[in-house]
Image (tube, rainbow, N blue to C red):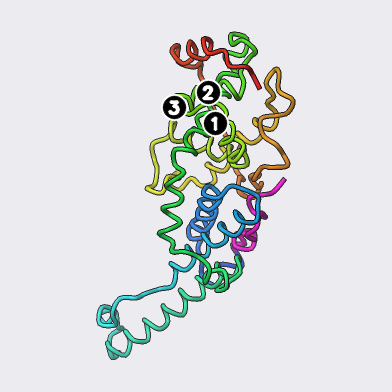
Amino acid sequence: MPSFLNSDCPLREILSRSHCDVALGVHEEFVDIAVTNWLLALLTYPGIDSGSVRNRREFFAAWASTLFFEPSRADDLAGLAPQGADPLAFAQFAVEELKQHERAKAEFFLSSVGGMKTLANANSFEHYCSEFDKHAETRRRIGETMTLLRAASIHHNRGLRGGASLSKALDFVFGADGINLPDAMKTWTAWRPVAHFCAAYTYLWNTRITWKDGGFPDGELGHFFQTALDFERWGLSFTSLRAKSALLSVDQLWSVDDGLAQLPNAITKFGPLPPKTLDTLIKRRVPPR
């Protein structure tokens, strides 16, 4: 199965803390930002086709281009000059040093996706942020489908005719937004490779309160990936009563690399579904898949 780290961007090189620290002074927090932006690219273009590969690389290149440093005017740095130094000369020197340092950092990340050639074909970073936002509702529905299905399989498998199934969960979540089951199934198929990421996002959103504007846990990137890994393992093992295969497919899944989840196993808890939700699932009796 394709790995998150070794998909089509060599993030393993980026995640080499010693290489980053020695070469560029890139701290762990900054590397986490790079990983987060690659995840954003994957959650915007989740496919395994060549077009999605290209779009992800250009998304990441556009983000890396934002690292090219545009310092304040030299006058603004003059006040930082050491005692006895020429303030203007110091400021001009500082600006050039900062430019070179930040440019090297940006070029390091750009090199992982083809360098300036990839950037030349990319849209603005704002464009990709807009594209990411366009899929927010889809990611929410995919995440809610997987978390609802997991809770139903734990607590209500016997109470539901045919047991807990993907089609029941899809019909409930997508149907609430007026989307019919065939269209919901098409969306699930397209987003299935990243369904565990969507589920982790949904689960953490509903159970934690510290979140960044970008939507990922503040200072808890590792915990996010650990939760995604928990959903990945469950999805690969869960098969509804009449299904021919597991919920997730090892052949079409952006697997969470162990290097991104070096924490104790995530503790995920799922209580029974609310009575109204359960009643709706029972009454709909969607044919299990």
Helix, strand or loop for disc 2: helix
Q: Is residue 255 above or below residue 142?
A: below
Q: Is residue 277 magenta?
A: no
In the rendered image, the quadrant that contains the N terminus is top right
Place residue 108 in its image quadrant: bottom right
Residue holding disc 3: 178
Q: Residue at x 56, y 29 (%)?
A: 146
Instruction: Mark 3: give few (<14), some (14-19) or many (20+) Cα within 10 Å.
Output: few
Label 1 amino acid?
Answer: Ala
Q: Residue at x 32, y 90 (%)?
A: 89
- Label 3 or label 2, whichever comes before in sequence order: 2
Report the number of discs: 3
Q: Is residue 28 above or below residue 149?
A: below
Q: Residue at x 69, y 32 (%)?
A: 236
Residue holding disc 2: 171
**Chain part drawn in magenta:** 1-17
- Label 1 or label 2, whichever comes before in sequence order: 2
Position of 1 with respect to 35 (left or right) is right
Give the image location of residue 234, x and y in percent: 65, 30
Q: Are marks 1 and 2 in contact (CB under 8 Å)?
A: yes
Label 3 amino acid?
Answer: Gly
Position of 84 with respect to 117 (left or right) is left
Q: Is residue 78 visible?
A: yes
Majority SS type along the magenta span: loop
Residue 184 is labelled as: 1
Q: Is residue 84 above or below residue 128?
A: below
Label 2 amino acid?
Answer: Asp
Residue 101 is labelled as: none
